[in-house]
Image (cartoon, helix red, strand yellow):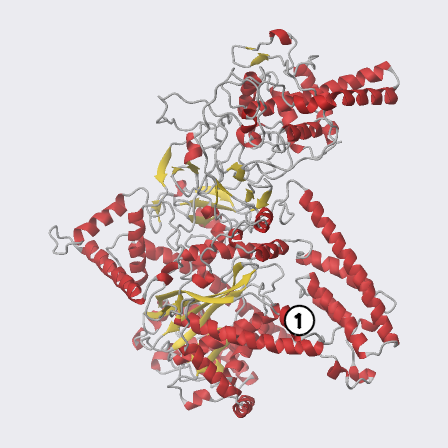
Amino acid sequence: NSMNNSMNNSMNNSMNNSMGNSMHNPMGSNNFPNSNGSSSSHNNAGMITASPDPIAPNFNSMPQSQSQPQSSSTHKMPPPIGGAPSPSDMFSSMTPTQPGQNMYQSELDTVSKSRQSGKSASNTSSSGNNNSRGRDSTEWQKVRHKQQRLLLLRHASKCQYESGKCPVTPHCAPMKKLWEHIAHCKNQQCTVQHCMSSRYVLSHYRRCKDPKCPACGPVRETIRKSGRGQGDGKLPDLPESKSIESGPSPFAMPPHEPKAPTLSMSPPERHPKRIKTEKSPLSAPSDSTAPPIKSPSSSLETPKPPLPQDVQSVPTTKPPQPTKPPVTTKVDDHSLVNSFTTEEIELHLASLHKAVQLPPAKLKAKCGEVLKGLQSHQHGWVFNTPVDPVELGLPDYFELIKKPMDLGTVSKKLDSGTYHFIADFASDVKLTFENAMSYNEEGSVVHDMAKELKAKFAADHKKMMTQLELEDKEARKNDRACTLCGCEKLNFEPPVFFCNGMNCQSKRIRRNSHFYIGGNNQYYWCNTCYNELDGSIPIELADMSVMKNDLKKKKNDEVHEESWVQCDECENWIHQICGLFNNRHNKEPNSKFFCPKCLLTKRKNGLPMQPRPPSAADLPRTKLSEYLEKHVHRKVAEKKSTIANEKMESERVAMTEAMKQLECGKITIRQVTATDRKLEVRDLMKKRYAHKNYPDEFPFRCKCIIVFQRIDGVDVVLFALYLYEHGEDNPLPNKRCVYISYLDSVHFMRPRQLRTFVYHELLICYLDYARKKGFSTAHIWACPPLKGDDYIFYAKPEDQKTPKDARLRQWYIDMLVECQRREICGKVTNMYDLYFANEDLDATVVPYLEGDYFPGEAEIIIKDIESGTGKKGGSGGKKSKKKSSKSKGRGNRSDDDSPYGEKDNSLPPKSYKEGGRDEVMVKLGETIHPMKESFMVAFLNWSGAKAEDLIVPDEIQEFRKKAEAGGSAKLERENRKRDLDDVERDNSGQPVKVIDDDDEDMDCEFLNNRQAFLNLCRGNHYQFDELRRAKHTSMMVLWHLHNRDAPKFVQQCASCSREILTGTRYHCNTCPDYDLCEECYKNPKANRGACTHELQAITVEVEKENQSGGTNGLTEAQRRERQRNLQLHIQLIEHASRCTSSSCGSSNCAKMKSYLKHGRTCKLKASGGCKICKRIWTLLRIHAQKCKDTVCPIPQCMAIREKIRQLAKQQQAMDDRRRQEMNRAFRMSMSGAQGG
């Protein structure tokens, strides 16, 4: 028994010392007067010396064994991890007692006599002597004393009467003083009366999970019953800073949270939840001293707090009380679930069912156990290997069995992680036996074997599912677990930090290593870069300067836990992610939140649906997105029909059943960005080819496409694609080329067999769109990301494998072959054959594309050439001869493909400027030759295409002829033309507004490049590793897309952990990331951690949410006028920044100058919510993206450009890593081939 171990052994000694022989008295004093003369006195220090208990509850009548009820607190979210909760937080779930009668007396008196008699009989029968009865009586008195102490502490924490005026019990005032002392006490051997014993009692109660505990169980049950079902049976948690035992805290303290002493005797468990609305007015003060606060109403008489509801309902005499002000309560749109249909809520709840959605390791173990039983069966050998029709003499096998399957194949698929659901595994196992029963006649040996094993599998599968259901139910019974998913504490992926040092080039800071932070906590230095800093020289950052001694040391070991939210109906706690809770909507103090289970019950009872918030379909439409979406919808319908027909033949099901199995949510495709950008040529490349007038930069248009699918009522982000378009006005070699830069996906698409098909069709359709726009070539670098790197989506599923190089290349080749069949593109080649195989070409003919392999590798090769030339004094030294010999060897291996055949090495080669071969092309050609198939170039069939660029293989020609003869080619062309020309109309019949993405900019700060989106997801814990997290992340991404001006990151209160969305936040300029909400700042008893500095008040601008879907509601004229006004304001800000005249002729110049001056002096800034700064910042950011001046006079332009460069550095660092890894992998494969 945990109580006997933790309390009787280690606690009773301390309690006996403090309580003495006064077990009849709950305060443990021997000099108390009896009940008819009750009073309480205090010593000079204000601590308790005596307090009688004339109305002590009859604890002998309490039941001995009761289960712990569920929480009924009205909090909404837990405090920061590791923060010491205030006493009011820990007692907030307690229900105040009723005045005029003994605490819990009405419930306890009914069972007092029977309980006492039962106890007496038990003692008599068990001991049989007076000594045993005396010992039992003494032990019971100790237990009774502990119960009394718990209930009195509970009452004192919730009582709202002024000190000394509580009609419930005369012990209230001294118990309040005791509780306030406990909140501050850190002494491990405190001599204050009742301090140590009370802390032991509270600590045991907090940890005890035994429903049969003689001390805790009856207390929980009594509280629940006496509170008429409103109590939760929970007593205060002992504050971490006041715990008894020494040692490290089991709670992880995030570095951005204020650190407080964290000694704890309790195991890790869910942290106390914070209050959503009001905090108890009797919260014990925290250890930290807050800045002095002068209340504006301090001179007024403070009205007495209204009595609790259960106190007001007692028909006995009670003191006068003020009228409780009416509270208007409404159901707010905290959760997307509020707008779900009944069916969507049920689907969402089913998706959280852990019995059917297992982690990959557990799914493999459970299904592997069932499969092993089948394979080891006496008939299992028949079905363990694929059927060989030739060996078995079954020539018609594949004519009758369209989809062969065997247990060996199932085992391989299970080991490789192919199965994501138990249903997929079960389907293949059943198919194995059904194929055998279908091919072999009934009554045959094989048919009977298959029938027997099929029945065994059905029984084993049912047993496994029953076991999983029981495990899931047991997990949900835990009051510390989420009632939706059954899980307790769930951690996010650890945060990622990139070094800003000069030598690291934005490399990641290793996990569990120390680093340094500074510059408003936005810049980081690894230990190596920090040691290289000069302490006497200021560190110049983009927007400030800092000294080395200003940097603070931290350790990269942060762990962040998923937040919780409490249902206002059932009062159960759930993960915010499970409940699709949108924290940005948590603004109304009196609004209610219903968990999906309660909402489902209310919906069935007639509760109406709330309007659905702006969804993916409400995002602005563009010409490109409309063309892509129509094409994909048409192709998906055709593919589903084809698959359904195959299912009819192979699985012998009806067409309706086959189509039902292929049902999927609506796919929505939207373009979210369309901005003009420029790629600056790197220094060495620019210098080497300056004599050929090589451009300094290449402008291009960046577009981002996102694919959503409606899954269980949520538009889930499944696929993202970044495209770089270099138009006709681009200089060579980038003229008229498109670059498929980055694409990324998660495997949650339903049905899963459509996943590759949809993404291929999207790329095919885009290339068709590009050729119609006049682009001539498409470039692709097929290179998978490295382990630990993400292209676009942060933290993908564990069971989603990163494709290998060969598989990724084949994925792109299959797509391009289909493009050739549809006459969208002609010749498909590679960069090596196109550029490097021709000795007359130099590096200036190779397209210079952002994020591509060529720019980074060319810069390294040029650097090596220049350093080698400097050392050897020319290009004809020993090193050149050695490399020439190597080239000769490579030429012998592949003379047809390589330009490096046998050469005369007796004469030094001509230099590049003397007409010789460009050494950059030679070395780069040697590097990429073994992996040339990864650099794909497709010539598009545009109106100006040359005949030699449209040559395709013979099999493609044959396919085109057959398609033309059958009419399918003509039909495809007509459909594509219809997709381009058709006009989408809304429900009223009006044409849907479509933006020309080539003429109008679509600016989205967090999606303009993939690194900005990754940073948004990392900073807000928007992950895609589970479907439930992908749903929540997609919901928040859509919220950001529809509210693009809203802050991307918001501050959290260090005390209550609530995001500060309204009112005033109080910021510490000394402690990192320390803010308090207005409520906690004005509450002197709020836990403020270790911060004692003066806080700066910053007004938080209320976020105005856009319910119309961005600019989609504007007319064409309004959008153009908006673009025109934006450009005029940018021109004005450029003029005002350069204008020095005091009497400028421009009427708006002086006004803009005042705005710029405001931006320099404003303390709030844009991040603090200043409206003027926000607007000015937007104009400055747009200007900075296009500014080319070396020194720009416009304020903040250089700082913004530096931040843009920092993002580019992070992206470039990842590109360099994968380029280097690709080189290393191919070098190893080549050396292995040579060694073999």
Residue 243 at x, y percent in the picture: 60, 28
Placement of the C terminus among the 4 image quadrants: bottom right
Residue 720 at x, y percent in the picture: 48, 65
Q: Is residue 1173 left or right of residue 252?
A: left
Q: Is residue 116 left or right of residue 42?
A: right
Q: Residues within 10 Å of mark 1 (few under 14, many from 20)?
A: few
Which is nearer the eye, 574 or 933? 574
> Eyeballing the image, is 579 above or below 729?
above
Total numbered badges shown on the rendered structure: 1
Which is nearer the eye, 1008 or 142? 142
Which residue: 53% across, 76% down?
Answer: 635
Residue at disc 1, secondary structure? helix
Which is nearer the eye, 256 or 904? 256
Q: Quadrant of residue 409?
A: bottom right
Placement of the N terminus among the 4 image quadrants: top right
Q: Quadrant of residue 24?
A: top right
Which residue: 42% across, 22% down?
Answer: 303
> Eyeballing the image, is 137 above or below 838?
above
Residue 964 at x, y percent in the picture: 52, 91
Residue 504 in sight? no
Residue 951 in sight? yes
Q: Quadrant of residue 405?
A: bottom right
Tag 1: amino acid: Glu
Which residue: 70% across, 79% down?
Answer: 649
Residue denoted by label 1? 657
Which residue: 35% across, 66% down?
Answer: 677
Residue 741 at x, y percent in the picture: 45, 69
Q: Is residue 314 left or right of residue 1053?
A: right
> Eyeballing the image, is 383 above or below 361?
below
